[in-house]
Image (cartoon, coloured by chain):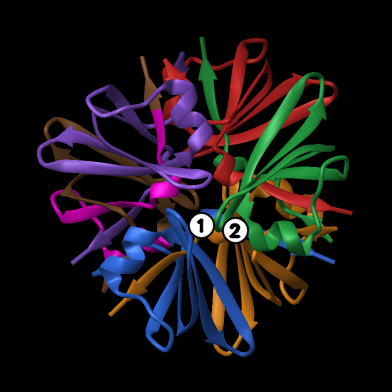
Chain colours: A green, B red, C orange, D blue, E brown, F purple
Amino acid sequence: MKLSARNQLKGKIVGVTKGATTSHVKIDVGGGKVITSSITNQAVEELNLKEGDVAYAIVKASDVMIAVD
Amino acid sequence: MKLSARNQLKGKIVGVTKGATTSHVKIDVGGGKVITSSITNQAVEELNLKEGDVAYAIVKASDVMIAVD
Amino acid sequence: MKLSARNQLKGKIVGVTKGATTSHVKIDVGGGKVITSSITNQAVEELNLKEGDVAYAIVKASDVMIAVD
Amino acid sequence: MKLSARNQLKGKIVGVTKGATTSHVKIDVGGGKVITSSITNQAVEELNLKEGDVAYAIVKASDVMIAVD
Amino acid sequence: MKLSARNQLKGKIVGVTKGATTSHVKIDVGGGKVITSSITNQAVEELNLKEGDVAYAIVKASDVMIAVD
Amino acid sequence: MKLSARNQLKGKIVGVTKGATTSHVKIDVGGGKVITSSITNQAVEELNLKEGDVAYAIVKASDVMIAVD
Protein backbone atom coordinates (compact mmCIF):
# COMPACT_ATOMS: atom_id res chain seq x y z
CA MET A 1 0.00 0.00 0.00
CA LYS A 2 1.32 3.42 -0.98
CA LEU A 3 0.15 6.51 0.88
CA SER A 4 -0.43 10.12 -0.14
CA ALA A 5 0.98 11.31 3.20
CA ARG A 6 4.10 13.40 2.57
CA ASN A 7 5.73 12.37 5.84
CA GLN A 8 6.56 8.73 6.44
CA LEU A 9 9.36 8.43 8.94
CA LYS A 10 10.85 4.99 9.50
CA GLY A 11 12.04 4.10 12.97
CA LYS A 12 11.87 1.73 15.88
CA ILE A 13 9.17 1.63 18.54
CA VAL A 14 10.64 2.62 21.91
CA GLY A 15 7.47 2.83 23.98
CA VAL A 16 3.82 1.79 24.03
CA THR A 17 1.59 3.16 26.81
CA LYS A 18 -1.98 1.97 26.89
CA GLY A 19 -4.77 4.04 28.40
CA ALA A 20 -8.46 3.25 28.75
CA THR A 21 -9.20 3.77 25.03
CA THR A 22 -6.14 5.65 23.72
CA SER A 23 -2.50 4.55 23.52
CA HIS A 24 0.69 6.52 23.07
CA VAL A 25 3.34 5.00 20.86
CA LYS A 26 6.85 6.44 20.65
CA ILE A 27 9.03 5.86 17.59
CA ASP A 28 12.74 6.66 17.50
CA VAL A 29 13.31 7.90 13.94
CA GLY A 30 17.06 8.39 14.32
CA GLY A 31 19.26 11.40 14.92
CA GLY A 32 18.01 11.59 18.49
CA LYS A 33 14.45 12.28 17.36
CA VAL A 34 11.53 10.48 18.96
CA ILE A 35 8.02 10.89 17.53
CA THR A 36 4.99 10.46 19.81
CA SER A 37 1.74 9.17 18.31
CA SER A 38 -1.67 8.98 19.95
CA ILE A 39 -3.79 6.19 18.46
CA THR A 40 -6.57 3.85 19.55
CA ASN A 41 -5.84 0.80 21.70
CA GLN A 42 -7.58 -1.18 19.00
CA ALA A 43 -4.97 -0.13 16.43
CA VAL A 44 -2.13 -1.09 18.78
CA GLU A 45 -3.64 -4.54 19.20
CA GLU A 46 -4.46 -5.07 15.54
CA LEU A 47 -0.95 -4.15 14.39
CA ASN A 48 0.50 -5.88 17.45
CA LEU A 49 2.77 -2.90 18.11
CA LYS A 50 5.48 -3.41 20.70
CA GLU A 51 8.88 -2.09 21.70
CA GLY A 52 11.64 -2.94 19.27
CA ASP A 53 9.38 -3.24 16.22
CA VAL A 54 10.25 -1.36 13.06
CA ALA A 55 7.44 1.08 12.28
CA TYR A 56 6.66 4.31 10.45
CA ALA A 57 5.29 7.57 11.83
CA ILE A 58 2.87 8.88 9.21
CA VAL A 59 1.86 12.55 9.11
CA LYS A 60 -0.21 14.41 6.53
CA ALA A 61 1.43 17.66 5.35
CA SER A 62 -1.62 19.68 6.40
CA ASP A 63 -1.06 18.53 10.00
CA VAL A 64 2.43 20.02 10.21
CA MET A 65 2.86 23.54 11.55
CA ILE A 66 6.07 25.56 11.39
CA ALA A 67 7.71 27.45 14.24
CA VAL A 68 10.73 29.74 14.33
CA ASP A 69 12.73 31.05 17.27
CA MET B 1 6.44 30.20 24.12
CA LYS B 2 6.26 26.53 25.11
CA LEU B 3 3.94 24.18 23.22
CA SER B 4 1.95 21.12 24.26
CA ALA B 5 2.74 19.46 20.92
CA ARG B 6 4.75 16.29 21.53
CA ASN B 7 6.64 16.58 18.26
CA GLN B 8 8.87 19.57 17.65
CA LEU B 9 11.55 18.70 15.14
CA LYS B 10 14.30 21.26 14.58
CA GLY B 11 15.74 21.59 11.11
CA LYS B 12 16.54 23.83 8.20
CA ILE B 13 14.10 25.02 5.54
CA VAL B 14 15.03 23.51 2.17
CA GLY B 15 12.04 24.60 0.11
CA VAL B 16 9.14 27.04 0.07
CA THR B 17 6.53 26.68 -2.70
CA LYS B 18 3.74 29.24 -2.75
CA GLY B 19 0.36 28.47 -4.26
CA ALA B 20 -2.69 30.69 -4.58
CA THR B 21 -3.57 30.51 -0.86
CA THR B 22 -1.54 27.55 0.43
CA SER B 23 2.23 27.06 0.62
CA HIS B 24 4.34 23.98 1.04
CA VAL B 25 7.39 24.30 3.25
CA LYS B 26 10.02 21.56 3.45
CA ILE B 27 12.26 21.21 6.49
CA ASP B 28 15.32 18.97 6.57
CA VAL B 29 15.35 17.62 10.13
CA GLY B 30 18.58 15.65 9.73
CA GLY B 31 19.37 12.00 9.13
CA GLY B 32 18.14 12.34 5.56
CA LYS B 33 14.61 13.15 6.71
CA VAL B 34 12.66 15.99 5.12
CA ILE B 35 9.29 17.02 6.56
CA THR B 36 6.69 18.64 4.30
CA SER B 37 4.25 21.13 5.81
CA SER B 38 1.21 22.68 4.18
CA ILE B 39 0.41 26.10 5.68
CA THR B 40 -1.19 29.37 4.60
CA ASN B 41 0.71 31.85 2.44
CA GLN B 42 -0.08 34.37 5.15
CA ALA B 43 1.89 32.34 7.70
CA VAL B 44 4.86 32.07 5.34
CA GLU B 45 4.88 35.84 4.94
CA GLU B 46 4.35 36.65 8.60
CA LEU B 47 7.19 34.38 9.73
CA ASN B 48 9.21 35.40 6.66
CA LEU B 49 10.08 31.75 5.99
CA LYS B 50 12.77 31.13 3.38
CA GLU B 51 15.33 28.55 2.39
CA GLY B 52 18.20 28.19 4.80
CA ASP B 53 16.26 29.39 7.86
CA VAL B 54 16.30 27.32 11.02
CA ALA B 55 12.74 26.20 11.81
CA TYR B 56 10.74 23.57 13.63
CA ALA B 57 8.17 21.15 12.26
CA ILE B 58 5.42 20.93 14.89
CA VAL B 59 3.02 17.98 15.00
CA LYS B 60 0.38 17.12 17.61
CA ALA B 61 0.57 13.47 18.76
CA SER B 62 -3.04 12.88 17.72
CA ASP B 63 -2.08 13.70 14.12
CA VAL B 64 0.52 10.92 13.90
CA MET B 65 -0.52 7.53 12.55
CA ILE B 66 1.59 4.37 12.70
CA ALA B 67 2.31 1.98 9.86
CA VAL B 68 4.15 -1.34 9.76
CA ASP B 69 5.42 -3.33 6.81
CA MET C 1 2.07 -1.69 4.67
CA LYS C 2 -0.55 -1.88 7.42
CA LEU C 3 -1.92 1.29 8.94
CA SER C 4 -3.17 2.20 12.42
CA ALA C 5 -5.94 4.34 10.89
CA ARG C 6 -9.32 2.92 11.88
CA ASN C 7 -10.99 4.07 8.68
CA GLN C 8 -9.78 2.70 5.35
CA LEU C 9 -12.57 2.90 2.79
CA LYS C 10 -11.97 1.20 -0.53
CA GLY C 11 -13.46 2.79 -3.63
CA LYS C 12 -12.87 4.18 -7.08
CA ILE C 13 -11.53 7.62 -7.93
CA VAL C 14 -14.23 9.69 -9.64
CA GLY C 15 -12.52 13.05 -9.78
CA VAL C 16 -9.11 14.72 -9.49
CA THR C 17 -8.98 18.53 -9.44
CA LYS C 18 -5.56 20.13 -9.31
CA GLY C 19 -5.01 23.56 -7.83
CA ALA C 20 -1.82 25.58 -7.50
CA THR C 21 -0.41 23.41 -4.68
CA THR C 22 -3.43 21.45 -3.42
CA SER C 23 -5.59 18.88 -5.22
CA HIS C 24 -9.02 17.52 -4.44
CA VAL C 25 -9.58 13.83 -5.05
CA LYS C 26 -13.04 12.27 -4.91
CA ILE C 27 -13.48 8.56 -4.18
CA ASP C 28 -16.78 6.74 -4.64
CA VAL C 29 -16.83 4.22 -1.78
CA GLY C 30 -20.13 2.63 -2.77
CA GLY C 31 -23.68 3.00 -1.53
CA GLY C 32 -23.91 6.42 -3.14
CA LYS C 33 -21.17 7.78 -0.88
CA VAL C 34 -18.38 9.92 -2.31
CA ILE C 35 -15.46 10.96 -0.10
CA THR C 36 -13.56 14.17 -0.86
CA SER C 37 -9.88 14.36 0.04
CA SER C 38 -7.63 17.40 -0.05
CA ILE C 39 -3.98 16.43 -0.59
CA THR C 40 -0.84 17.91 -2.13
CA ASN C 41 -0.37 17.98 -5.92
CA GLN C 42 2.90 16.20 -5.26
CA ALA C 43 1.05 13.24 -3.72
CA VAL C 44 -1.31 13.06 -6.69
CA GLU C 45 1.65 12.92 -9.05
CA GLU C 46 3.68 10.47 -7.02
CA LEU C 47 0.79 8.01 -6.70
CA ASN C 48 -0.28 8.83 -10.27
CA LEU C 49 -3.91 9.17 -9.12
CA LYS C 50 -6.51 9.41 -11.87
CA GLU C 51 -10.18 8.74 -12.49
CA GLY C 52 -11.14 5.10 -12.49
CA ASP C 53 -8.29 3.96 -10.24
CA VAL C 54 -9.06 1.84 -7.21
CA ALA C 55 -8.01 3.72 -4.07
CA TYR C 56 -8.63 4.00 -0.36
CA ALA C 57 -9.81 6.97 1.65
CA ILE C 58 -7.85 6.86 4.92
CA VAL C 59 -9.10 8.73 8.01
CA LYS C 60 -7.74 8.63 11.56
CA ALA C 61 -10.46 8.06 14.19
CA SER C 62 -9.52 11.28 15.97
CA ASP C 63 -10.41 13.23 12.82
CA VAL C 64 -14.03 11.99 12.74
CA MET C 65 -16.71 14.07 14.43
CA ILE C 66 -20.26 12.93 15.07
CA ALA C 67 -23.45 14.84 14.28
CA VAL C 68 -27.08 14.09 15.03
CA ASP C 69 -30.23 15.68 13.65
CA MET D 1 -26.93 23.91 10.83
CA LYS D 2 -25.06 23.38 7.57
CA LEU D 3 -21.40 22.42 7.63
CA SER D 4 -18.46 23.14 5.33
CA ALA D 5 -17.16 19.59 5.85
CA ARG D 6 -17.14 17.76 2.51
CA ASN D 7 -17.77 14.38 4.11
CA GLN D 8 -20.99 13.81 6.03
CA LEU D 9 -21.83 10.12 6.08
CA LYS D 10 -25.21 9.14 7.48
CA GLY D 11 -25.48 5.88 9.36
CA LYS D 12 -26.45 4.10 12.53
CA ILE D 13 -24.42 3.92 15.73
CA VAL D 14 -23.30 0.33 16.35
CA GLY D 15 -20.98 0.85 19.29
CA VAL D 16 -20.07 3.35 22.00
CA THR D 17 -17.00 2.60 24.16
CA LYS D 18 -16.26 5.05 26.94
CA GLY D 19 -12.75 5.52 28.29
CA ALA D 20 -11.49 7.80 31.04
CA THR D 21 -11.83 10.98 28.97
CA THR D 22 -12.16 9.72 25.39
CA SER D 23 -14.88 7.59 23.78
CA HIS D 24 -14.93 5.58 20.59
CA VAL D 25 -18.14 5.65 18.58
CA LYS D 26 -18.71 3.33 15.64
CA ILE D 27 -21.17 4.22 12.88
CA ASP D 28 -22.33 1.75 10.24
CA VAL D 29 -22.67 3.88 7.10
CA GLY D 30 -23.95 1.07 4.90
CA GLY D 31 -22.34 -1.17 2.31
CA GLY D 32 -20.51 -3.03 5.05
CA LYS D 33 -18.58 0.08 6.04
CA VAL D 34 -18.17 1.03 9.69
CA ILE D 35 -16.56 4.35 10.62
CA THR D 36 -14.76 4.72 13.96
CA SER D 37 -14.72 8.11 15.65
CA SER D 38 -12.73 9.17 18.69
CA ILE D 39 -14.45 12.01 20.57
CA THR D 40 -14.69 13.31 24.13
CA ASN D 41 -16.89 11.57 26.71
CA GLN D 42 -18.49 14.96 27.21
CA ALA D 43 -19.68 15.02 23.57
CA VAL D 44 -21.11 11.51 23.88
CA GLU D 45 -23.09 12.61 26.92
CA GLU D 46 -24.22 15.93 25.50
CA LEU D 47 -25.52 14.36 22.28
CA ASN D 48 -26.73 11.33 24.25
CA LEU D 49 -25.18 8.97 21.68
CA LYS D 50 -26.14 5.33 21.98
CA GLU D 51 -26.40 2.19 19.85
CA GLY D 52 -29.16 2.26 17.28
CA ASP D 53 -29.24 6.06 16.93
CA VAL D 54 -29.07 7.63 13.50
CA ALA D 55 -25.93 9.77 13.29
CA TYR D 56 -23.45 11.27 10.83
CA ALA D 57 -19.71 10.77 10.63
CA ILE D 58 -18.24 14.15 9.72
CA VAL D 59 -14.78 14.46 8.19
CA LYS D 60 -13.03 17.55 6.79
CA ALA D 61 -11.51 16.96 3.34
CA SER D 62 -8.07 17.97 4.59
CA ASP D 63 -8.18 15.06 7.06
CA VAL D 64 -8.58 12.42 4.35
CA MET D 65 -5.48 10.73 2.94
CA ILE D 66 -5.41 8.51 -0.13
CA ALA D 67 -3.79 5.10 -0.43
CA VAL D 68 -3.34 2.78 -3.39
CA ASP D 69 -2.34 -0.87 -3.48
CA MET E 1 -27.93 19.29 13.38
CA LYS E 2 -25.97 18.99 16.64
CA LEU E 3 -22.24 18.40 16.55
CA SER E 4 -19.84 16.53 18.85
CA ALA E 5 -17.21 19.25 18.32
CA ARG E 6 -16.42 20.90 21.66
CA ASN E 7 -15.67 24.27 20.07
CA GLN E 8 -18.37 26.10 18.14
CA LEU E 9 -17.64 29.80 18.11
CA LYS E 10 -20.33 32.07 16.71
CA GLY E 11 -19.26 35.17 14.83
CA LYS E 12 -19.45 37.18 11.64
CA ILE E 13 -17.53 36.53 8.45
CA VAL E 14 -15.05 39.35 7.81
CA GLY E 15 -13.14 37.93 4.87
CA VAL E 16 -13.31 35.29 2.16
CA THR E 17 -10.23 34.72 -0.01
CA LYS E 18 -10.52 32.18 -2.79
CA GLY E 19 -7.51 30.32 -4.14
CA ALA E 20 -7.31 27.73 -6.90
CA THR E 21 -8.91 24.96 -4.81
CA THR E 22 -8.69 26.25 -1.24
CA SER E 23 -10.31 29.29 0.37
CA HIS E 24 -9.54 31.15 3.57
CA VAL E 25 -12.50 32.39 5.58
CA LYS E 26 -12.07 34.75 8.51
CA ILE E 27 -14.68 34.93 11.29
CA ASP E 28 -14.73 37.65 13.92
CA VAL E 29 -15.88 35.84 17.07
CA GLY E 30 -15.91 38.94 19.27
CA GLY E 31 -13.53 40.34 21.83
CA GLY E 32 -11.12 41.29 19.08
CA LYS E 33 -10.61 37.67 18.11
CA VAL E 34 -10.61 36.64 14.45
CA ILE E 35 -10.50 32.94 13.53
CA THR E 36 -9.01 31.87 10.19
CA SER E 37 -10.35 28.76 8.50
CA SER E 38 -8.98 26.98 5.47
CA ILE E 39 -11.70 25.09 3.58
CA THR E 40 -12.46 24.00 0.02
CA ASN E 41 -13.77 26.47 -2.54
CA GLN E 42 -16.62 24.03 -3.04
CA ALA E 43 -17.71 24.45 0.60
CA VAL E 44 -17.61 28.24 0.29
CA GLU E 45 -19.86 28.04 -2.75
CA GLU E 46 -22.25 25.47 -1.32
CA LEU E 47 -22.78 27.44 1.91
CA ASN E 48 -22.66 30.70 -0.08
CA LEU E 49 -20.29 32.20 2.50
CA LYS E 50 -19.68 35.93 2.21
CA GLU E 51 -18.64 38.89 4.31
CA GLY E 52 -21.18 39.95 6.89
CA ASP E 53 -22.80 36.51 7.25
CA VAL E 54 -23.26 35.03 10.69
CA ALA E 55 -21.27 31.79 10.92
CA TYR E 56 -19.61 29.42 13.36
CA ALA E 57 -15.99 28.35 13.55
CA ILE E 58 -16.02 24.66 14.45
CA VAL E 59 -12.97 22.96 15.98
CA LYS E 60 -12.62 19.45 17.38
CA ALA E 61 -10.97 19.36 20.82
CA SER E 62 -8.23 17.05 19.55
CA ASP E 63 -7.17 19.75 17.08
CA VAL E 64 -6.47 22.33 19.81
CA MET E 65 -2.95 22.62 21.20
CA ILE E 66 -1.97 24.62 24.26
CA ALA E 67 0.91 27.08 24.56
CA VAL E 68 2.26 29.01 27.51
CA ASP E 69 4.69 31.94 27.60
CA MET F 1 9.02 30.92 19.45
CA LYS F 2 6.67 32.14 16.72
CA LEU F 3 4.13 29.80 15.17
CA SER F 4 2.61 29.48 11.71
CA ALA F 5 -0.79 28.63 13.25
CA ARG F 6 -3.30 31.31 12.26
CA ASN F 7 -5.30 30.95 15.47
CA GLN F 8 -3.64 31.71 18.79
CA LEU F 9 -6.25 32.65 21.36
CA LYS F 10 -5.00 33.95 24.69
CA GLY F 11 -6.99 33.11 27.79
CA LYS F 12 -7.02 31.60 31.26
CA ILE F 13 -7.17 27.91 32.09
CA VAL F 14 -10.47 27.13 33.81
CA GLY F 15 -10.27 23.34 33.95
CA VAL F 16 -7.85 20.43 33.65
CA THR F 17 -9.29 16.89 33.60
CA LYS F 18 -6.81 14.04 33.45
CA GLY F 19 -7.69 10.67 31.98
CA ALA F 20 -5.57 7.55 31.65
CA THR F 21 -3.42 8.96 28.82
CA THR F 22 -5.39 11.98 27.57
CA SER F 23 -6.32 15.21 29.37
CA HIS F 24 -8.91 17.85 28.60
CA VAL F 25 -7.92 21.44 29.21
CA LYS F 26 -10.43 24.28 29.09
CA ILE F 27 -9.35 27.84 28.34
CA ASP F 28 -11.61 30.85 28.82
CA VAL F 29 -10.66 33.16 25.95
CA GLY F 30 -13.01 35.96 26.95
CA GLY F 31 -16.42 37.07 25.73
CA GLY F 32 -18.01 34.04 27.35
CA LYS F 33 -16.07 31.68 25.08
CA VAL F 34 -14.39 28.58 26.49
CA ILE F 35 -12.15 26.46 24.26
CA THR F 36 -11.71 22.75 25.02
CA SER F 37 -8.43 21.07 24.12
CA SER F 38 -7.59 17.39 24.20
CA ILE F 39 -3.86 16.80 24.74
CA THR F 40 -1.59 14.16 26.28
CA ASN F 41 -1.18 13.91 30.04
CA GLN F 42 2.54 14.22 29.39
CA ALA F 43 2.04 17.68 27.85
CA VAL F 44 -0.04 18.81 30.82
CA GLU F 45 2.73 17.73 33.17
CA GLU F 46 5.58 19.15 31.13
CA LEU F 47 3.93 22.58 30.81
CA ASN F 48 2.62 22.25 34.38
CA LEU F 49 -0.83 23.41 33.26
CA LYS F 50 -3.29 24.25 36.02
CA GLU F 51 -6.37 26.34 36.65
CA GLY F 52 -5.77 30.06 36.66
CA ASP F 53 -2.72 29.94 34.38
CA VAL F 54 -2.56 32.19 31.36
CA ALA F 55 -2.37 30.05 28.23
CA TYR F 56 -3.08 30.06 24.50
CA ALA F 57 -5.37 27.80 22.50
CA ILE F 58 -3.55 27.11 19.23
CA VAL F 59 -5.44 25.92 16.14
CA LYS F 60 -4.17 25.46 12.58
CA ALA F 61 -6.45 27.07 9.96
CA SER F 62 -6.90 23.75 8.16
CA ASP F 63 -8.48 22.33 11.35
CA VAL F 64 -11.29 24.92 11.42
CA MET F 65 -14.59 24.12 9.74
CA ILE F 66 -17.38 26.60 9.11
CA ALA F 67 -21.06 26.15 9.91
CA VAL F 68 -24.07 28.31 9.17
CA ASP F 69 -27.59 28.14 10.57
Residue B39 % position (x, y): 51, 35
Name the residue that disc number 1 marks.
C63
Q: Is residue D50 above or below residue C50?
A: below
Badge 1: how crowded within 10 Å, few (<14), some, or many (20+)?
A: many
Residue F65 % position (x, y): 36, 54
User: What secondary structure is found at the residue carrying circle 2?
Assistant: loop
Measuring 76% from the left and 64% from the top, which residue is drawn there? A46
Residue D5 % position (x, y): 41, 63
Query: Which segment is the magenta one?
Result: E42-66
Measuring 69% from the left and 33% from the top, which residue is drawn there? A35
- Do marks 1 and 2 share a chain? yes
Name the residue that disc number 2 marks.
C60
User: Which quadrant of the rendered structure holds the N terminus of chain E?
Assistant: bottom left
Instruction: Name the side, left or right, on which F28 lies relative to D66.
Output: left
- Identified by mark 2, the residue type is Lys
Viewer-side residue, B19 vs A67: A67
- Identified by mark 1, the residue type is Asp
- The chain holding disc 1 is C
Could you tell me how far apart the alpha carbons at marks 1 and 2 are, in whole angstroms? 5 Å
Measuring 51% from the left and 47% from the top, which residue is drawn there? F20
Badge 2: how crowded within 10 Å, few (<14), some, or many (20+)?
A: many
